[in-house]
Amino acid sequence: MPPPGKKKQGKVCRDCHRVVDGENCAVCGTTNLSDDWAGYLVIIDPEHSEVAKKMNIRLQGRYALKVR
């Protein structure tokens, strides 16, 4: 649960961890989304990001570190 006054950015894809605005993931197309996630990550340059490599992220965007 976010602290009072702070709102989470949306739902997160359980498969690729991408933060999505609609009802399905724009990257993998799934509708397997979760409201229960933690850790906000923005990938700008996935080719040179060690975190992106560890999380197997190939596209820039907003991601969650942990999805339940």
Image: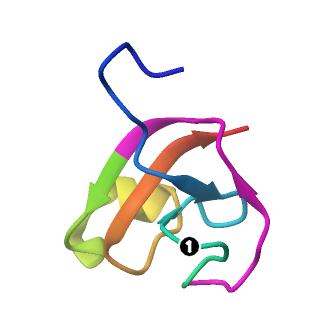
Query: Is residue 6 shown above or below 12?
Result: above
Q: Position of residue 14 (x, y in %)?
A: 71, 57
Q: Position of residue 37 (x, y in %)?
A: 59, 37
Quadrant placement of the N terminus? top right
Q: Residue at x 66, y 36 (%)?
A: 36
- Start and end of the magenta stretch? 27-40
Q: Residue at x 36, y 13 (%)?
A: 4
Name the kind of residue labelled 1 in the image.
Gly
In this view, the residue in front, 27 or 54, is: 27
Query: Is residue 7 shown above or below 46?
Result: above
Q: Residue at x 66, y 77 (%)?
A: 24
Quadrant placement of the C terminus? top right
Looking at this view, name the residue that lies furthest to the front.
5
Q: Position of residue 18 (x, y in %)?
A: 51, 64
**Regarding mark 1 in the picture, which secondary structure is present there?**
loop
Q: Quadrant of residue 58?
A: bottom left
- Colour scheme of this structure image? rainbow
Q: Residue at x 75, y 78 (%)?
A: 30
Q: Position of residue 11 (x, y in %)?
A: 58, 54
Q: Which residue is mark 1?
A: 22
Instruction: Assess whether residue 32 is covered by the magenta stretch.
Output: yes
Q: Quadrant of residue 47?
A: bottom left
Looking at this view, name the residue that lies furthest to the top.
4
Q: In this figure, what is the number of numbered marks?
A: 1
Instruction: Assess whether residue 7 is covered by the magenta stretch.
Output: no
Q: How many C-alpha atoms fall within 10 Å of the one at disc 1: few (<14), some, or many (≥20)?
A: few
Left or right: 31 with respect to 44? right
In this view, the residue in front, 65 or 24, is: 24
